[in-house]
Image (tube, rainbow, N blue to C red):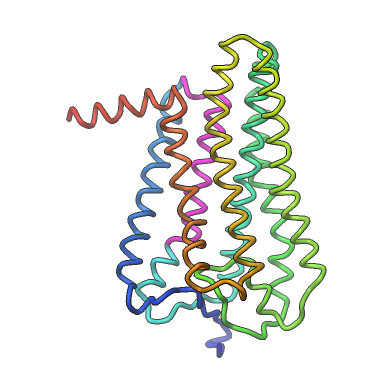
Amino acid sequence: MPTAMNVTYIILDGHLEIEKYRYVYFVFMFTSYVLILSSNSTVFCLIVIHRNLHEPMYVFIAALLMNSMLFSTVVYPKLLIDFISEKQIIAYEACLFQMYLFYSLSGSEFLLLAAMSYDRYVSICKPLQYPTIMRKRKVTVLLVLSWLVPACHLAVPAVLYAQLKLCSFTLKGIFCNSSVNYNFCVYSRALYIYGLVILFDLSILPMVFILFTYTVIIIVACRSGGDVRKKAAQTCLPHLLVLLNYSCLLTYDVIIVRLKSEISKTVSFVMTLQIIMYSPLFNPVVYGLKMKEIYKHLKRLLCHARGK
């Protein structure tokens, strides 16, 4: 696409019959965005307000919900603008920034889930040492690393991408992701290998760690009394459901990027919408309904609102 005022634009060509259904898409996605922000912020505020929820497990849940809101805000506003615009375009620099935030926050999701699994491991397998191990300082360090590590990992390819020459200005997607690799004039093997390193460090490694810790928790719970088994089921099941959901979405993203030319535009469009909708909507529902203490405060809030 021609440059204007030294700004290079990328055409987002992943939309499906946008001229015909633009307002349907807009209303649907705007409703989804409002639901994501309201549901996540409600549970987040409950955790912040109530002192009995100021424990490491709930702090990590609050961080995960905030990460979901940030993740959605990276994609939804631009998507909503595109739905009602004549041209679905984005400046190349803005595209790289969106891709950087998209994958950085995705990596943070896995690291936060890994931190939560470590918290559950210490709580169930080493209950007497829990107050000593999971101190406020350690929780803060884990939270900072969960956002800092992905941000540093993704900074390298973002800088290198900015220096590569584009030969194609059409992106087969509705927002910027690693599909931009196919737009460069020269295929970079170094960037491809580094991408695999990022995938391993921010997705596969945390997932293996999570599965390992929950396997140990299950073994310990099976050997212990009914109270331990009940505690493990109540606190670990929501985390596992969120992990399963997000892992499926990560697989979707990899499939879409790798098989972009082999899958239809309709399938790609639907799968992409699932990636940006399911997890942010799923998290507050799971934690709001499955975590007993959060559910009690949520129920009290809804009853109070109904009474008014």
Tell which residue pokes out farthest to the bottom in this image: 2
Q: Nearer the viewer, residue 179 or 78?
A: 179
What residue is at 72 percent from the left and 76 percent from the top?
A: 163
Is 272 magenta? The answer is no
Q: Position of residue 302 (x, y in %)?
A: 28, 30
What residue is at 56 percent from the left and 64 percent from the top?
A: 98
* On screen, residue 234 above or below 98: above
The magenta span reads 52-76
Q: Position of residue 141 (x, y in %)?
A: 68, 35
Q: Position of residue 71 (x, y in %)?
A: 52, 53
Q: Position of residue 260 (x, y in %)?
A: 61, 72
What residue is at 63 percent from the left and 25 percent from the top?
A: 120
Quarter assignment of residue 199: bottom right
Q: Nearer the viewer, residue 238 or 79?
A: 238
* On screen, residue 228 above or below 244: above
Identify the image quadrant of the C terminus.
Answer: top left
Tell which residue pokes out farthest to the left in this image: 308
Is 72 magenta? The answer is yes
| Apparent side of residue 141 relative to residue 188 in the rendered image (left or right) | left
| Apparent side of residue 52 relative to residue 124 in the rendered image (left or right) | left
* On screen, residue 84 above or below 27: below
What residue is at 60 percent from the left and 45 percent from the top?
A: 109
Q: How many marks?
A: 0
Identify the image quadrant of the N terminus.
Answer: bottom right
Q: Main secondary structure of the magenta part?
A: helix
| Apparent side of residue 189 relative to residue 59 in the rendered image (left or right) | right
* On screen, residue 244 above or below 182: above
